[in-house]
């Protein structure tokens, strides 16, 4: 995971070590879509009080398999997917599951905070999380999956954000 603090804001780049549990993979091959959430939270560190949340960002992913065409579809959105199908999302098709997982694993220059909410002299901590969103699964699967370790998929990491480096032009 890498953080870049520029004049436009705070950007996150990451490569996730992602391996799907066998129960999740089996459900995908049966045509059941799986939903994932990538979340980043930017905290301003304070010595006198608890850390203050200054920015939050989330990405929502839906991975599905089409048994008739034998193709994988990965949709990405900045808002949760709804049953109505309305909303804006970026969709990609893949021939193999490994290709779709490879696309899910890469996050490149994702803007997680605007420059307006960041102070140059403050210290920031970024909490990152990638997880399977159980609330988006069909209701019978939610009931059956609760408490079963075969459905657990969660990656988390915290990292300090670098300070904004001003160039000679920016300091004038």
Image (cartoon, grey):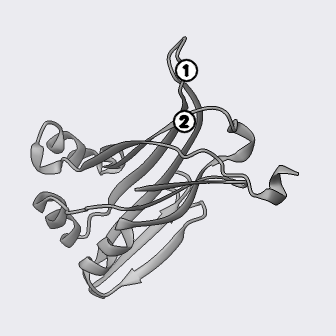
Vertical comparison of 53 with 96: above or below: above
Where in the figure is residue 40, as x and y percent of width and height?
A: 48, 45
Residue at point 75% right, 41% down?
116
Where in the figure is residue 88, as x and y percent of width and height?
A: 60, 64
- Name the residue tied to disc 1: 46
Q: Nearer the viewer, residue 30 or 13?
A: 13
| 168 left or right of 88 in image | right
Where in the figure is residue 117, as x and y percent of width and height?
A: 70, 37
Can you say which quadrant of the picture contains the N terminus?
A: bottom left
| Mark number displayed over residue 124 | 2
| 86 left or right of 62 in image | right
Residue at point 45% right, 57% down?
2
Could you classify mark 1 by the number of other residues whose Cα lies within 10 Å: few (under 14), some (14-19), or many (20 or more)?
few
Vertical comparison of 57 with 30: above or below: above
Residue lying at the far top in this picture: please name it: 48
Residue lying at the far front in this picture: please name it: 168
Residue lying at the far right in this picture: please name it: 172
Q: Nearer the viewer, residue 155 or 87?
A: 155
Vertical comparison of 101 with 12: above or below: below
């Amino acid at each position: 995971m890498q953080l870049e603090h520029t004049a436009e804001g705070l950007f996150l780049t990451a490569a996730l070590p992602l391996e799907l549990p066998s129960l999740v993979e089996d459900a995908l091959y049966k045509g059941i879509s799986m939903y994932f959430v990538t979340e980043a939270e930017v905290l301003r560190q304070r010595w006198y009080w608890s850390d203050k949340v200054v920015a939050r960002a989330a990405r929502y992913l839906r991975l599905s398999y089409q048994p008739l065409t034998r193709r994988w579809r990965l949709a990405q959105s900045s808002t949760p997917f709804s049953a109505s199908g309305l909303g804006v999302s970026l969709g990609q098709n893949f021939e193999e599951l490994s290709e779709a997982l490879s696309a899910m694993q890469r996050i490149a220059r994702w803007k997680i905070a605007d420059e307006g909410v960041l102070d140059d002299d403050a210290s920031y901590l970024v909490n990152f999380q990638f997880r399977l969103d159980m609330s988006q699964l069909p209701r019978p699967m939610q009931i059956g999956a609760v408490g079963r370790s075969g459905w657990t998929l969660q990656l988390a990491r915290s990292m300090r954000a670098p300070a904004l480096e001003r160039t000679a032009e920016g300091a004038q």
